[in-house]
Structure formats: C-alpha cells, structure tokens
Image (cartoon, helix red, strand yellow):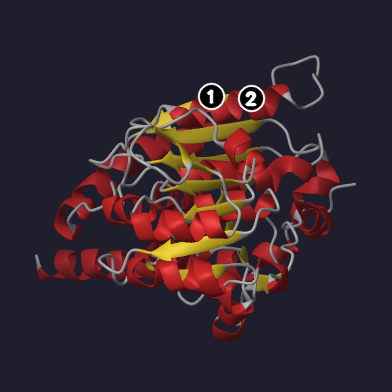
Amino acid sequence: MFMFAAEAAFVFLFICLFFIFRFYIVVKTGRNHRPGTKGPVSVLVVAGSGGHTSEILRLMEHLSAAYAPRHYVIADTDRMSEEKISTFESSKPQSASETHFIFRIPRSREVHQSWSSTVISTLNALRFSLPLVFRLQPDVVLCNGPGTCVPLCVAGLLLGILGIKKVLIVYVESICRVQTLSLTGKILYLISDYFFVQWPSLRDRYPKSIFLGRIV
Amino acid sequence: MKTVFVTVGTTSFDELIERVTSAEVTQELKSRGYERLVLQVGRGALLPAADSCSHLRLEAFRFKDSIAEDMRRADLVISHAGAGSCLEALGAGRPLLVVVNDRLMNNHQLELAAQLHADGHLLYCTCSTLTGTLRDMDLSALQPFQPGQPKNFANFLDKALGVK
C-alpha cells in the first residue's frame, strides 16, 4: 500500500515537472517559431466587445491575405461586434473561399463583476475555449485585452505544452493603458510570445514588451 | 455656423450637460463666436429642450449609430474622458476639450486623456473650471495628433512570423 502511494506521488511529481519544463521551453522558444514560412497563417482573433473590437480591427487593417483563415471569437452578450467584423471583412478583397468565421463564447468577466464569481465564470469560459482551440489549432492567437482572451490563450499554451502544436500568442495592450497594464495584460505578459505596448512608460516598466509607437 | 459638439459616449454625465447649458457657459461660448451647440447626452437624465437656451441654437440627442458627422462638423468638441470619444475627436482633427468627471476617481480611462493632455493634444478641465478654461483657451496651441500606424504592426508581424 505504501509502495503504491509512493509510486503515485512520484508519477504525479514527474507529470508536474514535465509540465513546468514544457511550459518553460514553449514560452522561451516561441519566437523561433515562424509559421509564415510554411504558407498561410491561421489566426484566432479575440475580439471581445465594444472598444476592444474596434481597436483590434484597426490593428488588422494592414495584415495581408496570408493571414487566413481568420477565426473571430466574440462574447455571447455582445451584439455590436459581429456587425463591425462583418463590415471589416467585407471591405477586404474577396477571395474564392470563405476566410473568416465567427464564434461566440461566454464572457469570463463582465465589467464590475466580483472577483470570486470571476473565477467560476473563467472556468466556465475555459470549458468552451479548450475544445474550440484544440479543434481550430490556429498558428496565432491575436488579442488585445478583453478577459475572454485569457482562457483562449491558456488553451493555446496547452497545445504547445502537450507538443500538439505551437500556438503563438500575440498580445497588444490597449492604447488606453498608459501607465499600468490591464489585469489581462499582466497575466498574458507571462505567457505571450509577442507583447506590444503603445506608450513608452509601459515599455520602460516591462522589458519584454515591444514598442512600435501607437499602432491603432 | 460655428458649432460646439458635446459628447459623453455611452455613459451619463449630467453635471457636464447642466454646466455646458448654463447661462454662464453659453454666454462665454457666444462671446467666442460659437452659434450652435449640439449635445450627445447618452444615458443621462438630462435631455435639454431646443428652446432652453437663449444664447445659442441648441440640439440634443441621446445616441446615434455614428457621431462621425457631428464630429466632422464641429469647430470644438467637448468630451468626457472616455478613450473612444477622445480618439475619435482627435482622429477627426477637431480641437478637443476633455472635461473630467471628478466623481469617477481612479478610472483607468483617465490615463489616456491625461497623457494626451501632457503631450499637448487636448485641453483638460473639470466642470467647475469649464468657464475659465473656455475663456482662456488657445486652440491654436494644440499639437496635431498623428494617427497610430497599424502598418508598423503588420510589418513587424510579417518579419517575425516569416510571412512573405
């Protein structure tokens, strides 16, 4: 009996160490990964809602047709974003095949929601995010701050940790953030491969960040 | 007709609407040559009637699908500190006066307006200092606001991901 418990503990410890090791490797080596050299780059775009959607569509204005297909994720309580996305996509040159898709997932955090219920609804959002990301297996997750992007990025990270596919996480902090990162930004600073900020004061505080001036 | 456009975005900011339609402020606007005042009042309780102002031609509405046209036609935009409203006004190249709602302290939205003010792109005041700010303002001293460059982001990503 004791032997069995010891063995189980050993296996558990081994799995934990393996995950930590893989996590380290996946995050450290992300920037060596260049999916664009092998053809089109599929993108999962986390649009979120309201101002976040406008901002991320502006970011995407100059992305070439090589970034396809584009899978948009919006919050299920959001009505405006779908319209904005459709308008944006219809302004692009038409291609023969369908190149954009829209998915809805539960919001992980409404504005003003309490922190304890945030944990529950984030777990709930993860239940939707994992199957979606595992099915789509995008090359890149592009996001800019809505809480919805945390479970989606974690799902992308997990694909890498399990050795199924390296998903690059590209995060652009909202232009509204001048002095401090958003909560989402603070979390994704740790796991993103490319982390953009739009003000010099944030660049100085976060050495891993990339600063190209204002980009929206 | 020289127009002032006041916008509070999706919020409510009755204190601003009340202040900007007061005899004191409308008189100040009139003496600076403005003739028309357009108010977007959002979720506020106040929706001033068109005949409630003796100095200026007044129009008020709650929401529109797009306020781009109102922005474009304005000679001065007075806005709450919301990032969306500030960027829309500056993007349209309009002189902008941001009125901070000091009842909303620690609101991170203020960060952007404060920075844009520090960089000389907009004027910045509270409801209580609005009249004085309108009297003393020099719109020609405002720094033009260059739009952000999403092209730089696309170029960076192309290079980083090896996209040709």
Residue in the foreground of this view, choosing between B122 and A135? B122
Give the number of the disc on residue A83: 1
Disc 1: CA contacts within 10 A as few (<14), some (14-19) or many (>=20): few
Q: Pinpoint residue B75: horizontal percent, then vertical percent.
A: 64, 50
Q: Which residue is mark 2?
A: A87
- What amino acid type is highlighted by mark number 1? Glu
Give the number of the disc on residue B105: none
Q: Pinpoint residue B51: horizontal percent, then vertical percent.
A: 36, 33
Q: Residue at x 57, y 42 (%)?
A: A54
- Image side of residue B45 versus residue B1, left or right: left
- In the rendered image, which quarter contains the N terminus of chain A? bottom left
Q: Residue at x 47, y 54 (%)?
A: B79
Given the image, what chain letter belongs to the residue carrying mark 2?
A
Can the viewer see residue A189? Answer: no
Hey, which residue is sitting farthest top in the picture? Answer: A96
Placement of A27 over or under A109, stated as above or below: below
In the rendered structure, are the residues bearing label 1 and label 2 in contact, judged by CB atoms less than 8 Å apart? yes
- In the rendered image, which quarter contains the C terminus of chain A? bottom right
CA distance separating discs 1 and 2: 6 Å
